[in-house]
Image (tube, rainbow, N blue to C red):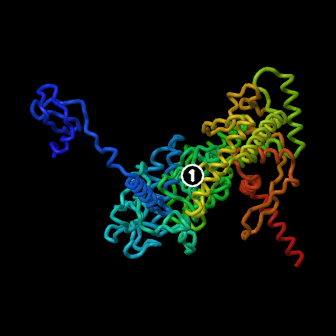
Amino acid sequence: MEFEEARDFSERCTQCTAVSWGITDEGTYYCTSCLNVTERCKEVESIVDFTPNTKIQAISRGLKKKRKLEKGWEWYVCEGFQYVLYQQAEALLSLGVCPKLKDEVLHNFWKRYLQKSKQAYCRKPIYSNDNKSAASDSHLSLSGLDSEPELLSIRSCPSSEGEAESQSDVNSGLILPNIKTTQCETTSVCSGSVDGVEYSRQKEKGILKMTLPMTLAFCYMSLLWQRETITLSDLLRFVEDGHIPYINTYQNFPEEMKLYGQDIKFFSVESWPVYEDIYEKMIELGKFLDLPRFPDITENCFLHPNMLCMKYLMEANLPDEMHSLTCQVTRITGMGEVDFLTFDPITQKTKTVKYDVQAVAIIVVVLKLLFLLNDNVEWSLSSLAQENNENNHEGKPYFDFRKWYQIMKKIIDEKQQKQEEFRAKYLWKSAKPLYYSSVDRSVVYKRRRMVANLQKQFSILVDSAPNPEKKKPSSFQLNWAEDQNTTCFHGHSLQKILQKKGKSLTTLNSQYWLSTQKFCKSYCKHVTTYEESNFSVSYQFVLNFFSFLLRIKTSLLHEEVSLIEKRLFYKKYENKSKASKSKKARRF
């Protein structure tokens, strides 16, 4: 065969002058007589062999093959949420969380959710026929949280012979099912995922549907189980600062996971997560999963009020001596007990504790005990402290509430303005455009390119400043040790505010007013109401300051302060309730 292909080469050999050529494996000519190899190579195809028609047909075949794969992988909604959970778990690990949170805790929580929601590890998964079951009945393990199913794929779908498994780079403790490319027509025209339409219509009682806020509930529940140092307010702050994926997480999906139509409702949000919403979802999720009692919150844990109060006293630039008072309030009210602090979803009367909000509320109560915060006593005590500081320059300076108020108000006003500007300028649309139908894909991409070009041209004309760098993650938003331009009140003394009475210290202020005189009925969703006009300016400022630190509503903090006062001054509330009952009896 090689001699026939070399017939066209008629030159004589430079060594033996013979005309007998063969072709090597590399395509060069060699002399069969003396085995001399030349530098001449055989052309694979001559120009005459190519015709325009064959060339066009080859290109056409390639385009058709590409169009068959345009639908991408066949994937399910739960797989998309699982991918989001994986990204969030990796982000938490980068923040210093223990690796067990992803490999064990979150892994088991997610596996239990798939089983409870009948999406995997059950005999009859939803949206699956008998011939498309997720796993064989003989291999199912339904024992509970600690069970390890042998099959990790959620569902399998019959596909053509050309089906090939995807090579996903997600090799983690989370259960990422085998996502497969397929040419079958199971994917809906109205959804990129297989079950997008069915998932949106699902209204089965007792089934907790997965949403993007629910992914944060999973993360916080895992952090709580591990007793990590990240509170819920820290978690939501890291989300807003971009350290934990939440907004536009779908743009990190593999290119083969096509997302459009109904999928947009599941994986696209245009609002920041709210503290109360995530907290309620976490409680609902814990009950849905029938989780056992969480590990105990002891005094050595970061989530204990004594530890959190110390953190927020430092961040609020308040005197260190206040920590002993916060510890006393915690002990008297019983809020430091293990049974009070530990989350137990199984109990009928589930005691839920907002650890960060509770710690801040204790500090507010201590400030009221020291300064009353009625727009009168705090200013009188401030004048007294200012006079003593001017006359006495030795030892610790006395804490001046007025000076602290002025410094903190200026800083918080600047921080709030920056936050409002950031939220107002935030671009919710991602670089990866969304479309509601595969037919609209080309139009949407064309519009996005036009918008990108216009933005680029306007930015050149306006000469806009570059985007600010992402903030480094930190548990503290305010660091007073590094800021040399402001006064640090950590070492200031409360000596003039406290007076000795025997062996104990009592506050110079002997009065106290209750934040809530009468609580709402049991059928109300809230404990009390908060109207700013009914309270003093100093009390409003303290609530607004700590609410900004935690990114919560002021009414939520006021409600927590009222509940602590109810435990601290329970006798006053009992006397009021008895008096009100006696008045009603007299009327009748």
Q: Residue at x 50, y 46 (%)?
A: 90
Q: Return the residue nearer the eye: 556 or 431.
A: 431
Find residue 447 and report its horizontal and vertical position in percent.
64, 53
Residue denoted by label 1: 249
Could you tell me if residue 194 is visible in this image?
yes
Q: Is residue 276 left or right of residue 113?
A: right
Q: Is residue 183 above or below residue 230?
A: below
**Quadrant the C terminus occupies:** bottom right
Q: Residue furthest toward the bottom?
A: 588
Q: Residue at x 86, y 40 (%)?
A: 378
SS category of the residue bearing label 1: helix
Q: Return the residue nearer the eye: 217 or 340.
A: 217
Q: Residues within 10 Å of mark 1 (few under 14, many from 20)?
A: many
> Disc 1 residue type?
Thr
How many labels sit on residues? Answer: 1
Find residue 574 and report its horizontal and vertical position in percent.
77, 62
Q: Residue at x 80, y 66 (%)?
A: 577
